[in-house]
Image: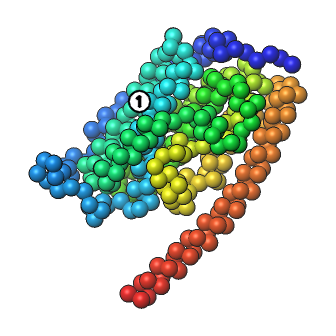
Amino acid sequence: MARNLTQLELLLELEPIAEQNVDRHLSMAKTWHPHDYVPWDEGRNFAAMGGLDWEPGQSRLGEVARAAMITNLLTEDNLPSYHREISENFSQDGAWGTWVGRWTAEENRHGIVIRDYLVVTRAVDPVALERARMAHMTNGYSAMKLVRESGRASAADLADTGFLHSVAYVTFQELATRVSHRNTGKVCDDPVADRMLQRIAADENLHMIFYRNLCGAALDLAPDQALQAISDIVRYFQMPGAGMPDWRRNGVLMAKHGIYDLRQHLEEVVMPVLRKWNVFDRNDFTARGDRIRNELGEFLEKLGQDCVKFEEQRDRALAREARKRELVSAKG
Ligand SMILES: [Fe+2]
Ligand SMILES: [Fe+2]
């Protein structure tokens, strides 16, 4: 059995690919300014400065759009946790260090612009939002910690986590946030919000490509070892929203209304990336890699069945709600 490469060996071997991809990213990334995406003329003082505090009637966003915006923003707010995870597992030197700094700075823009938009347009309760940010950031976020706490992964699966697990996780996570931002834009019914979220989603796509290319190169370099990390992440993936205040309610609303549900996760996030890495057609795995690939295949099949179950439940719930609304309007 081929031995696993150490963290240092992985980083050294992949440094030239990191450099190429940093250059690629810098040549494609567009400079944009958060202030250009916020309708400042809608802003008003709050009570502490002689104005009016927030009340629900001021929001022009619907319930689903609000839940999605809050979830997306709290995810962006938790950047220090993601920075930690990436900077601990990537190197501070050379192209790795350049990437970690640049990526962190770009991500920070997302939280800035969404918060400015929500506060200026009074789309959500700014006090509740601040409370949720404090709670969520104080808790911090660690993909692997959530996996450990879920009790779903075996100790053996999680014994050797580091660069490969990180880069696999962020590949899927960047694509998941792209899908979530794009679909949130669509339900806002506000061209200003849609334009802002499309801008952010374009950034997330470039981030995803960086990580996907690095993880793809890792798969070429150490096929079995990289596939183990990819398979762990796919099997135990949790959205970054997991663990945030009101996650259950907001996550369900988002899934129910097509912002991020299981089928989107499978068909728009997991499968396109696995296909890009050619996971199911490559022939450079040893028996160990083949075994991992089979387990992954079984898991994906089960996920496909879960999608159908979820959709049946969702359709029944939506039909019940529609009937309830009809009854209420008939009475009124
Ligand atoms: Fe982001
Ligand atoms: Fe991103």
Q: Which residue is mark 1?
A: 106
**In the displayed image of the protein, which residue is found farthest to the right?**
287
**In the displayed image of the protein, which residue is found farthest to the bottom?**
331
Q: Is residue 109 above or below residue 264?
A: above
Q: Nearer the viewer, residue 27 or 123?
A: 123
Q: Is mark 1 within 8 Å of ligand 2?
A: yes
Residue depicted at x 73% and y 53%: 304
Query: Is 10 positioned to the left or the right of 319 in the image?
Result: right
Q: Nearer the viewer, residue 36 or 177?
A: 177
Residue 96 at least partly seen: yes
Residue 196 x, y percent position in the rendering:
37, 45
Residue 202 at least partly seen: no
Q: Nearer the viewer, residue 158 or 256?
A: 158
Residue depicted at x 44% and y 60%: 64
Quarter of the image for the N terminus: give it.
top right
> Is disc 1 placed on a helix, strand or loop?
helix
Snapshot quadrant of residue 169: top right
Residue depicted at x 28% and y 48%: 119
Instruction: Report how many numbered discs are placed on residues in the image.
Output: 1
Residue 264 x, y percent position in the rendering:
61, 51
Q: Amino acid at mark 1?
A: Glu
Residue 100 x, y percent position in the rendering:
48, 21
